[in-house]
Image: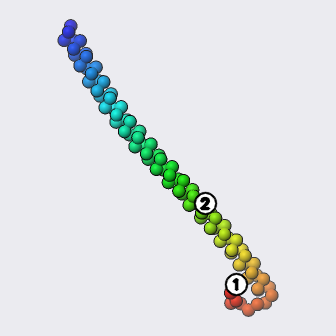
């Protein structure tokens, strides 16, 4: 009877040890995944900021292009010589 109880106790201690190792492994994996998520969030924030800057530049370029096209059309309409810089 005592031998059987000792064996059961030994099995339970082994199972407990295995579960503690598994818990530790999962905690490490969770920490690594949280760190990766944090890095991805940072990357998304940087890309969003960069996109906003590119959109602003594109908008300014469009305004400049429209302005130059209007200037060009005005020069053509008044018969100015072609090749004049704006």
Q: Nearer the viewer, residue 74 or 50?
A: 50
Report how many numbered discs are placed on residues in the image.
2
Q: Residue at x 74, y 81 (%)?
A: 71
Q: Residue at x 63, y 67 (%)?
A: 58
Q: Position of residue 39 (x, y in %)?
A: 46, 50
Q: Position of residue 54 (x, y in %)?
A: 59, 64
Q: Is residue 6 above or below residue 33?
A: above
For label 1, the SS is loop
Q: Residue at x 37, y 35 (%)?
A: 26
> In the figure, residue 79 lies in which quadrant?
bottom right
Q: Quadrant of the C terminus?
A: bottom right
Q: Position of residue 4 (x, y in %)?
A: 21, 12
Mark 2: give few (<14), some (14-19) or many (20+) Cα within 10 Å.
Answer: few
Determine the CA span between mark 2 and mark 1. Answer: 29 Å
- Residue named by callout 1: 86
Q: Quadrant of the N terminus?
A: top left
> In the figure, residue 80 lies in which quadrant?
bottom right
Pointers 2 and 1 in contact (C-beta within 8 Å): no
Q: Residue at x 38, y 36 (%)?
A: 27
Q: Is residue 57 above or below residue 49?
A: below
Mark 1: give few (<14), some (14-19) or many (20+) Cα within 10 Å.
Answer: few
- Among the two numbered marks 2 and 1 on one chain, the one whose residue lies closer to the N terminus: 2
> In this view, which residue lies farthest toward the right?
78
> In this view, which residue lies farthest toward the bottom?
81
> In the figure, residue 64 lies in which quadrant?
bottom right
Q: Position of residue 72 (x, y in %)?
A: 73, 82
- Residue named by callout 2: 52
Q: Nearer the viewer, residue 58 or 79?
A: 58
């Amino acid at each position: 009877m005592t031998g059987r109880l000792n064996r059961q106790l030994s099995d339970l201690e082994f199972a407990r040890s295995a579960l503690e190792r598994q818990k530790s492994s999962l905690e490490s994996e969770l920490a690594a995944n949280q760190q990766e998520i944090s890095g991805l969030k940072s990357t998304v924030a940087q890309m969003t900021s960069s996109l906003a800057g590119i959109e602003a530049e594109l908008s300014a370029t469009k305004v400049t292009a429209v302005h130059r096209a209007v200037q060009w059309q005005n020069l053509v309409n008044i018969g100015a010589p072609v090749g004049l810089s704006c």
